[in-house]
Image: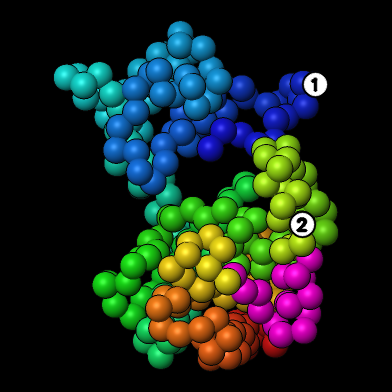
Amino acid sequence: MPRSNEPADKDRQFAATLANGIDILLAFDSGDAMLGNRDFAERTGLSKTTVARLTHTLTALGYLRHDTVLRKYRLGAAVLSMGYPLLASMHLRQLARPLMKALADRLCGAVSLGIRDRTQMIYVETARSTDSLIVTPEIGAALPMLSTAIGRAWLSHAPAHEREAVLNQLRLQDPDAFARAQPRLADARRDLERQGYCANRAEWRPEVYGFAVPMCQPVGSQLFVLNCGVPAAQGSFAAIEKQAGPQLRALMLDIERMLGLR
């Protein structure tokens, strides 16, 4: 995903070359095993000459691996090692994991913990009842904000200034999708106020119902959100919501108490 919030032209502290290199790494999507320089240029808007210099440098540093036969690039191990300190510093993950697994087993679904990354949500921990689920969330998986329960929960509870900045970025990225999402966002805010959780009626993935609860306040400057996905094949939305929504809310309350937030 390219940068969604371009810096002001007068920001002399902004290192454009560094930002361009990061954009190269961010160009990979979950389904991309390899990308070529042409792919990078199309996805980032950078010139082919700039892309060639950046991919050469990133390969030398270990962030990319070059396939000389296919003339394409894979992400290198340095990308993974760079993200590990962030995950390791989130002690909330270790605290919440056993409780998340217990709820996933009770609901025969998956329970995940996520934070915002630019205009998407990223899973930083996940637990599932079985690996045979149609949708098996993984740590690092990115989810859209407008069409998922976890994204709507974040937008419904984030600090106003941060929320407005993200909404503006989403509006600029896809004005039509943003306009279509407005009624659902309003519903999500009402649901969070009345029920303590947001829901997704298989709107993002037709085979999964989603439910999400934001933490009462940020931890380590991050607003964490608990998310639960239950296969739609298990029953009607109303029947699953009756079980999943309140239990997910209760799980978040337990975690908040353990953290001393309640």
Q: Is residue 170 above or below residue 237?
A: above
Report the coloring of the rendering: rainbow
Judge by depth and name the residue closer to the eye, 234 or 66.
234
- Quarter assignment of residue 59: top left
- Residue 187 belongs to the span the image colors magenta: yes
Reply above or below: 97 against 180. Answer: below
Q: Nearer the viewer, residue 243 or 202?
A: 202
Q: Do callouts 2 and 1 mark residues in contact (Cβ within 8 Å)?
A: no
In the displayed structure image, the side of residue 161 where residue 77 appears, left or right:
left
Name which residue type carries label 2.
Answer: Gln
Query: Which quarter of the rendering shows the C terminus?
Result: bottom right
> CA gap, disc 2 to disc 1?
33 Å
* Disc 1 target residue: 10
Of helix, strand and loop, which one carries label 2?
helix
The answer to whether residue 102 is visible is no
Q: Position of residue 4 (x, y in %)?
A: 65, 36
Left or right: where 196 falls relative to 128? right
Answer whether residue 15 is visible to the viewer in this image: yes
Circle 2 or circle 1, nearest the eye:
2
Q: Residue at x 34, y 28 (%)?
A: 35
The magenta region covers 186-200
Mark 2 and mark 1 lie on one chain; the one further toward the N terminus is 1
Please name the amino acid that badge 1 sits on: Lys
The answer to whether 36 is drawn above or below residue 245 in the figure is above
In the image, residue 73 above or below residue 260: above
Dot 2 corresponds to which residue? 182
